[in-house]
Image (cartoon, rainbow, N blue to C red):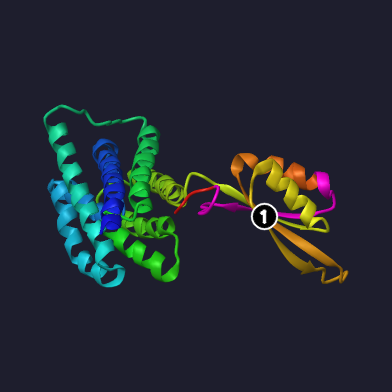
Amino acid sequence: MKTNLAQLLRTLPFVMLGTAIYAFGLQYFVLPNQLMEGGVTGIAILLNYAFDWPLSVTTLILNIPLYFLGWKVLGRSHIGYTIFGSVSLSVFLAIMEKMISSGWIEPFKTSNDYILAVLYAGVTLGAGLGIVFRYGGTTGGVDIIARIASKLKGWSMGQFILASDIIVIGLSLLYIPKEKVLYTLVAVFIASKLIDFIQEGAYAAKAFSVVTDHGDEMSKLINETLDRGVTIYPAKGAFSGKQKEVVYCVVARHEFRQLKTIVRSIDPLAFIIITDVHEVIGEGFKDG
């Protein structure tokens, strides 16, 4: 019980932070410049353009039917985060609407520099959603479906949302000029990349797989120099038939060149495979 409470206290503030950033991006950059968004939020934006319905109300109402789908597939805890995230988003949208209507904040509206509006819209929307997703929440709508697709099929949430956004934004051609739609696609693309970047982790490590005849010597020097653990696998060359060793080690990004130098200093003929690692859990990295 204490563990669950501690997890909630760590998670919910970040979900609120993400929805606040997302709401700010919508109200400050998207709506004033007649841009669009995808998914349920995009439908709510179209209703705002057509009937001047407040975004804070329509987003919440449109999300209600999807709560039941999320409850069935994702479970009670996940849908709880979803409800919290969508309600939090509506609250921050309402706060922004109040601040703008009262003149406390003047939205960024431009008639000749849409690129600037598009860039900042993409960054704020992507940063907001990325933070929400990273801490297990959603803002409802297509986010629920994207999380289901990620859980069942292993699809990238950013790419799934990008595809669904393009469909909804394409329908917006019936209501807004095509130039605005094209600008919106740029913002959505930026947002999708930032979602994946934040969700996978801004921290990126490097994994080394080194085929060598000097596994013990190499692993000892790596451990002494970088204080990193090393795993050695036995291997056999298919063509030569010779016995080899595969030295496997994961290092932080700033240690990349140093490890490469260590490998080359011991075995200049070593065969090295280097891959990006977006998340590492364990001793020397993060606890989980």
Mark 1 crowd level (few <14, some 14–19, many ≥20, 10 Å Cα):
some
Query: Horizontally, is 277 left or right of 179 in the view?
Result: right
Q: Residue 187 appears in which quarter of the rendering? A: top left
Residue in the image at 29% along x and 37% along y: 29
Q: Which residues are magenta?
A: 265-284
- Residue of label 1: 230
* Foreground pick, 101 / 47: 101
Residue drawn at 35 percent across, 53 percent down: 133
SS for tag 1?
Answer: loop
Residue 61 on image: x %, y %: 14, 57
156 sits left or right of 233 in the view = left
Residue 17 against residue 154 in the figure, above or below: above
Q: Quadrant of the C terminus?
A: bottom left
Which quarter of the picture shows residue 63? bottom left
Does the magenta-highlighted stretch encompass residue 99? Answer: no
Quarter holding the N terminus? bottom left
Residue 23 x, y percent position in the rendering: 25, 42
